[in-house]
């Protein structure tokens, strides 16, 4: 994880974390439904799903609610966020295992599917390819992988324009201009963001094929790909 991003997932920030995505991600609940439908096209009834960035537990809960036969292994470097995930997914705790750490700390056994939702913009650029490779190594051939994260052009002035749009969508009208500027600076300096073309090329390099864009909500993009 990007060291500057690690401070976002500790202490008081964790208790209110799950309030953020519904406000910041266009169509957040519908996004979970899309992910569920895409995974179910290939994932068997008793499938095992690997979830990278499982802290918060929202995607595990949504998928577990929709698919009673699936089991989930989630990994996240924040102990506090995993505690939140345990609370959110408590109704399915017999099907959910959570591991503190990074992708290397996830079990190696082959999975039927994997997700990384709102995760990769917290992974340092120099660690992204290896993270994708490690996900691919843990998937059965043909298994689906879904990634959703910030992705937009990285040349100026487009980069600054997309950051401003993301901030504007997530903050209420009339927000203190100083808070708006602080949010822009945080995104620009704490997060690791690639262009959509770079994201697709990296997934292909890591061993994924048929990479398809299925979601675009302002600054956030979502792809489904398959382990080659």
Image (spheres, rainbow, N blue to C red):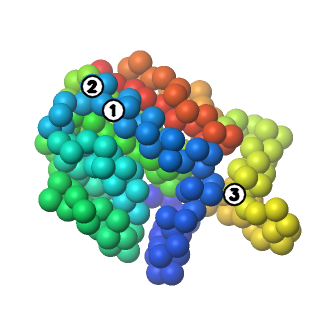
Q: Which mark is residue 42?
A: 2
Across the whole image, how many numbered discs are drawn on residues?
A: 3
Tag on residue 39? 1
Q: Secondary structure at mark 1?
A: helix
Q: Residues within 10 Å of mark 3 (few under 14, many from 20)?
A: some
* Label pair 3/1, CB-CB below 8 angstroms: no
179 over 217 or under it: above or below: below
Q: In 3D space, how far apart are the residues under numbered discs 2 and 1 (Cα atoms)?
A: 6 Å
Query: Image height check: is 174 above or below 170?
Result: below
Q: Are marks 2 and 1 in contact (CB under 8 Å)?
A: yes
> Circles 3 and 2: CB distance less than 8 Å?
no
- Say which residue appears at 50% left-offset and 59% top-offset: 2
Please state the horizontal and vertical placement of residue 191, each as a whole percent of the image. 59, 55
Report whether 101 appears left or right of 177. Answer: left
Tell me which label, 3 or 1, sits earlier in the chain. Answer: 1
Tell me if 189 is positioned left or right of 61 in this view. right
Could you tell me how far apart the alpha carbons at marks 3 and 1 are, in whole angstroms?
28 Å
Task: Where is residue 101? Give x, y as percent.
Answer: 30, 62
Q: Quadrant of residue 195?
A: top right
Q: Secondary structure at mark 2?
A: loop
In the displayed image of the protein, which residue is found farthest to the bottom?
12
Regarding mark 3 in the picture, which secondary structure is present there? Answer: helix
Up-down relation of residue 54 to residue 16 (above or below)? above
Percent from the top left, x then y, of residue 39? 33, 32
Query: Could one spot residue 55 in this view of the protein?
Result: no
Residue 170 has which mark? 3
Q: Residue at x 81, y 68 (%)?
A: 175
The residue drawn where x is 22% and y is 24% is: 141
Reading the chain from its start, which is encountered first: label 3 or label 2?
2
Write the residue at 34% across / 54% down. Answer: 61
């Amino acid at each position: 994880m990007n060291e500057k991003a690690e401070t976002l997932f500790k202490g008081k920030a964790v208790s209110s974390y799950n309030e953020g995505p519904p406000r910041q991600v266009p169509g957040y609940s519908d996004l979970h439904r899309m992910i569920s439908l895409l995974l179910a096209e290939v994932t068997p009834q008793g499938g095992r799903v690997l979830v990278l960035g499982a802290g918060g537990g929202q995607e595990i809960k949504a998928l577990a609610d929709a698919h009673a036969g699936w089991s989930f292994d989630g990994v996240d470097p924040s102990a506090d966020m995993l505690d939140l995930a345990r609370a959110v997914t408590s109704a399915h705790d017999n099907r959910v295992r959570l591991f503190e750490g990074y992708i290397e700390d996830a079990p190696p056994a082959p999975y039927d599917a994997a997700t990384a939702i709102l995760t990769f913009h917290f992974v340092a650029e120099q660690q992204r390819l290896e993270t994708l490779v490690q996900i691919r190594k843990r998937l059965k051939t043909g298994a689906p992988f879904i990634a959703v994260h910030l992705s937009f052009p990285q040349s100026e002035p487009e980069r600054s324009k997309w950051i401003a749009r993301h901030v504007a969508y997530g903050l209420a009208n009339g927000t203190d201009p100083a808070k708006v500027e602080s949010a822009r600076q945080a995104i620009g300096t704490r997060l690791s963001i690639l262009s959509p073309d770079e994201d697709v090329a990296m997934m292909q390099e890591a061993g994924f094929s048929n990479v398809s864009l299925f979601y675009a909500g302002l600054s956030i993009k979502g792809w489904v790909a398959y382990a080659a």
